[in-house]
Image: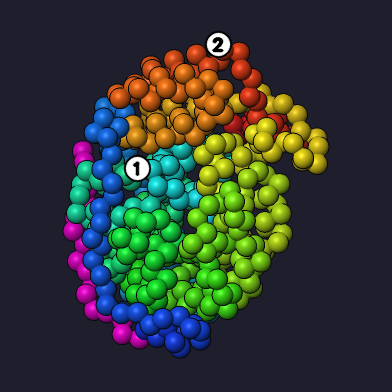
Amino acid sequence: MKFKIPPIPLNSSRNSCFPTLKSLMASSLTQTQTQTLTIHSDPPQPDPEDDLICSDQQQQQQQQQQLLLSSSDTSPFSLGSLTRCLTGESHIDRAWAHWLKLGRPKLIVAPMVDNSELPFRMLCRKYGAEAAYTPMLHSRIFTETEKYRDQEFTTCKEDRPLFVQFCANDPDILLEAAKRVEPFCDYVDINLGCPQRIAKRGNYGAFLMDNLPLVKSLVQKLALNLQVPVSCKIRVFPDLQVTINYAKMLEEAGCSLLAVHGRTRDEKDGKKIRADWNAIRAVKDALRIPVLANGNIRHIDDVQNCLEETGAEGVLSAESLLENPALFAGYRTGEWVVGSEGGDKVGNLDQTDLLVEYLKLCERYPVPWRMIRAHVHKMLGDWFRLHPHVREDLNAQSKLTFEFLYNIVDRLRELGTKMPLYTKDSHEDRVLATGNV
């Protein structure tokens, strides 16, 4: 049985009460045109072999998705009225009631294109992640293409709490896409932070910071028409007050949770440029809805430091999790042991172990091979630097199989290289005893 949702009838009326850039920002931001644009750039086309699903279990997987919501939804947002008030205390109260209902997750897998897919989310959840975002989904392609929906959005009953993230610049298209996923998630998230060139060409992500009336219309459209809350993920402006005003606008438009990446649109290199936790703190102090912090989370000590310095309800990690999916369980790579406060011990876990677990999850929850290939390179990057001939064999393999990838792991282990992950105190004991954190 295919996972299909019938077309969603949309209310095409637009809210005309948009702020002007001048009145909203009280700064020198340039006034831009406010008309809604249609996304006009498709994602780059992958290698045909890597775009294939890694298993023939897709039909079974789609049947499982039909059974995800067998129980009734008791979300405080399921009020059955599209005319409910989204301003003032009622909106804020519902935002916090929903967050509390989810257990106030603190350790969260950030959205990553082609990287935060279901098997990887489930691996991170085993090792301490308490919530996760899907990869960014292209709202127009999601509404138009069944193959794209089937391959790019997969989930399971255990994959909660879950944020489903879309990029968009048309409120009606965004709502149609959101309606298709709202039964299977806890937030529909709007990507307002992608700084890449493809986002600039497509007029989405962080490049909507130049068109704030459009941003407000996207948030309002979802907030007024969905049964689940809308969240947003943003980057900061160079001017702190502009950032605070931006965040307040999103809250007033109906955003129920805001994730703040503490870098500007132009600060793309996360390894060279530190995220500004002070800016995140200022946003947190200015808002009444839950705020999450994104940036500088390299190991578990960073998590505690970030929570203390920003006051945020939780933290998001991206690149560091790709290399070490057990980060939230207290494991760290050797890179972060040098110079630490001490107390680190060699753990009974390394990145080859994590990769094997990931591959087994891929056999259970099939995804395109291009995603698997990317994770192999990330998790085994340090190993490949020592044994480049093994990496070359991987790159030369145009059609991947699980047998081939398990053999790659065996070859690396047989070469005798030891690259353990390190842990402190009782983190490892808890994981081994319970299977999670």
Number of residue marks: 2
Residue 417 magenta-drawn? no
Asked if residue 78 is positioned above or below residue 367 in the image, the reply reads: below
Labelled pair 1, 2 in contact (Cβ < 8 Å):
no
Nearer-the-camera pick, 171 or 275: 275
| Magenta stretch: helix, strand or loop mostly | loop
The answer, for residue 22, to whether it is visible in the render is yes
Nearer-the-camera pick, 342 or 248: 342
Q: Residue furthest top?
A: 414
Kind of element beneath mark 1: loop
The residue that mark 2 highlights is 414
Crowding near the residue tagged with mark 1, few <14, some 14–19, many ≥20 C-alpha atoms within 10 Å: many
The disc labelled 1 sits on which kind of residue? Thr
Magenta residues span 1-17
Q: Quadrant of the C terminus?
A: top right
Residue visible at 52% across and 47% down in the picture:
318
Residue visible at 33% across and 46% down in the picture:
153
Looking at the picture, how far across and down is residue 408, in whole percent? 45, 18
Nearer-the-camera pick, 325 or 60: 325
Q: Residue furthest bottom?
A: 23
Q: How is the structure coloured here? A: rainbow
Distance between the alpha carbons at the discs numbered 1 and 2 = 35 Å
Q: Quadrant of residue 55?
A: top left
Task: Please state if 122 lies on the left or on the right of 426 as rendered.
Answer: left
Nearer-the-camera pick, 328 or 97: 328
Question: Which mark is drawn over residue 154?
Answer: 1
